[in-house]
């Protein structure tokens, strides 16, 4: 649905060149929620702005719904009619909502329809319908200044949907909201994604957002996409940083002569009580040191750190059994120095 | 001078002053509003960024603002003659008043429009809005309270200018004050013209402030 190839953006700043995007290839499939995560300054904002050409890429192409937007853009700074028409089919929501304080909620939602030159009666019908969809039908006559942050973002989402877009771009839409409101906004995005078949590209710096709603994710660092894929693809990638962050596990061996294993469930195997099978088959005691698991559509996704008694040499057979179940097994070299390198942040998260 | 002598003079003066101020305000807004918006759009980072054009217009505006109004008044006589057909009387004075106030008002508009959050501009662009749509739907409505405030300030400046214009062939309270109050030493008459001018300025400020407050209240906290 959204494809970028070789997307590069270089800013000129006081004679110096700053590369915000460096040869970014991204594939967002129709109907999925795709999250781009990265720290501030990683180029996420430039990326999402290049998708609807609010920023002109220095080179590379952007295709949305089969149309090459970079070709429509032309060379001038001003957006031509065709590009503006294409933009009106791409909804966008913003971190700071960007609602007009001088207009009522309903008039804010009508704004894109005014730009599309929709008649007055049709505008107000559509706006009320959208406000109902986001659960704010009773606030149509209020001004944005009278709403809470979460309500403002709902108005922002209703407004973004006014042009019947197939694609929704979300620029840190939940970053200014508290955790509970964040969850409700993410739930709304998920519902809209399912109900309207909306493709969502969101950028965020919060791993929780990716964990909650995304089907696929990409990790950006210094203008480059370092990893990208569906959540189970990422889990299946050995050494994936995103998988480790999404499903953090920690915990250390309870004593000497133990074997510590990281077991990755990447959703390819149907749910089976693998751990208890292992325990019964080989008559061994298994401790779970840490786990971050989810069950999505009857498939288990996530990672678990388990401990088996005895050194690795004694556990070759049980490990083989786990591998046979289609699980990915990494043996954790559990000497204390490696444990320190694991990082306190990860250990803390796992402790929750 | 008795009151019956003063009254028709004061009345005529007030009517002429209001006439000059009203029309020159209208011309100033029609000229200064687009100019101010244009200065923002062509500036660095603007939607129509064009620095050479921006600099040229900026210099013209600065020249207009730095010329003393008295000098502008006299320098514009041929132009006024060309536009109105005469360079004396209240109608003729509208020309130098507007020319003097347009650069001033344009800068106020520029400041007001620049204050509008760029995120809103981006939002309208993301909806497929053109530059005229950005100006009409975002820049002007969002800047409205500041713009009304700018008009108020400009009207008051024009009241002052119009009194000056009165000294060089215009009509209005300024000219009456000079002719009767100053040259004929009618101190009482002069004081009354000053009081009327103060009343006009106060009334304009009050109306302007009320309008700004009403506009600003809309959309702020309940």
Image: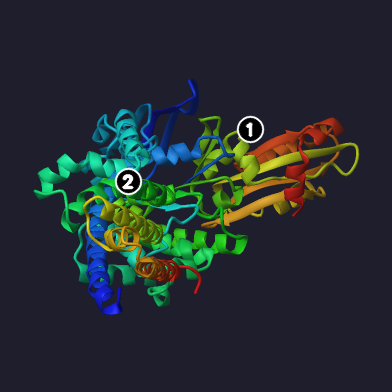
> Is residue A136 at all visible to an observer of this figure?
yes
Give the label on residue A239, or none: 1
Q: Nearer the viewer, residue B62 or A145?
A: B62
In the image, what residue occupies the spot 20% across and 43% down? A81
Assign the N terminus of chain A to one quadrant of the image.
Answer: top left
Residue A23 x %, y %: 44, 26
Q: Nearer the viewer, residue B171 or A141?
A: B171
Which image quadrant is residue B78 in? top left
Which image quadrant is residue A69 in? top left
Give the label on residue B36, or none: 2
Residue A148 x %, y %: 53, 67
Residue B152 x %, y %: 37, 61
Q: Is residue B86 left or right of residue A136?
A: left
Q: What SS does tag 2 mark?
A: helix
Q: Nearer the viewer, residue B167 or A123?
A: B167
Assign the C terminus of chain A to one quadrant of the image.
Answer: bottom right
Q: What SS does tag 1 mark?
A: loop
Residue A206 x %, y %: 59, 48
Q: CA distance from mark 1 to mark 2?
A: 57 Å
> Is residue A1 at all visible to an observer of this figure?
no
**Residue at the right extreme?**
A256
């Amino acid at each position: 649905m959204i494809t970028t190839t070789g997307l590069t953006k270089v800013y000129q700043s006081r004679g110096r060149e700053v590369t915000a995007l460096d040869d970014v290839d991204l594939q967002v499939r129709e109907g999925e929620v795709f999250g781009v995560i990265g720290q501030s300054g990683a180029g996420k904002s430039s990326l999402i702005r290049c998708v609807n050409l609010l920023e002109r890429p220095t080179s590379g192409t952007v295709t949305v719904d089969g149309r090459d937007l970079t070709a429509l853009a032309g060379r001038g700074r001003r957006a031509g009619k065709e590009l503006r028409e294409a933009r009106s089919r791409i909804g966008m929501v913003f971190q700071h909502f960007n609602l007009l304080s001088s207009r009522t909620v309903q008039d804010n939602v009508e704004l894109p329809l005014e730009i599309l030159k929709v008649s007055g009666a049709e505008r107000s019908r559509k706006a009320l319908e959208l406000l109902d969809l986001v659960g704010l039908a009773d606030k149509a006559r209020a001004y944005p200044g009278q709403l809470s942050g979460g309500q403002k973002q709902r108005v922002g989402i209703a407004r973004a949907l006014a042009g019947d877009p197939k694609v929704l771009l979300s620029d840190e839409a939940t970053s200014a909201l508290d955790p509970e409101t964040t969850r409700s906004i993410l739930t709304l995005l998920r519902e809209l994604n399912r109900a309207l078949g909306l493709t969502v590209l969101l950028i965020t710096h919060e791993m929780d957002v990716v964990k909650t709603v995304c089907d696929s994710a990409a990790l950006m660092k210094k203008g480059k996409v370092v990893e990208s894929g569906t959540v189970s693809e990422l889990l299946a990638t050995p050494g994936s940083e995103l998988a480790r962050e999404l499903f953090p596990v920690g915990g250390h061996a309870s004593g000497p002569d133990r074997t510590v294993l990281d077991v990755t469930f990447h959703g390819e195997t149907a749910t089976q009580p693998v751990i208890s099978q292992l325990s019964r088959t080989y008559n061994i005691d298994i401790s779970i040191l840490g786990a971050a698991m989810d069950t999505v559509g009857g498939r288990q996704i996530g990672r678990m750190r388990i401990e088996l008694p005895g050194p690795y040499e004694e556990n070759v057979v049980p490990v083989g059994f786990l591998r046979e179940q289609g699980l990915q097994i990494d043996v954790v070299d559990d000497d204390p120095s490696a444990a320190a390198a694991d990082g306190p942040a990860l250990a803390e998260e796992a402790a929750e | 001078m008795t009151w019956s002598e003063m009254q028709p003079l004061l009345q005529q003066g007030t009517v002429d002053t209001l006439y000059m101020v009203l029309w020159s305000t209208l011309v100033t807004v029609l000229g200064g509003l687009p100019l101010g918006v244009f200065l923002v759009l062509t500036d660095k980072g603007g939607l129509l960024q064009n620095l050479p054009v921006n600099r040229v217009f900026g210099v013209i505006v600065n020249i207009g603002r730095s010329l003393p109004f008295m000098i502008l008044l006299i320098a514009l006589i041929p132009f006024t003659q060309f536009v109105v057909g005469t360079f004396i009387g209240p109608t003729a004075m509208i020309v130098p008043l507007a020319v003097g106030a347009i650069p001033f008002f344009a800068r106020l508009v520029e400041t007001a429009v620049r204050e509008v959050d760029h995120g809103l501009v981006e939002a309208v662009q993301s909806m497929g809005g053109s530059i005229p749509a950005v100006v009409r739907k975002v820049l002007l409505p969002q800047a409205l309270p500041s713009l009304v405030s700018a008009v108020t300030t400009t009207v008051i400046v024009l009241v002052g200018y119009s009194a000056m214009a009165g000294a060089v062939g215009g009509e209005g309270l300024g000219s009456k004050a000079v002719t009767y109050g100053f040259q004929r030493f009618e101190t009482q008459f002069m004081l009354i013209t000053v009081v009327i001018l103060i009343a006009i300025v106060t009334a304009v400020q009050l109306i302007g402030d009320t309008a700004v407050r009403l506009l600003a209240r809309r959309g702020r906290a309940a």
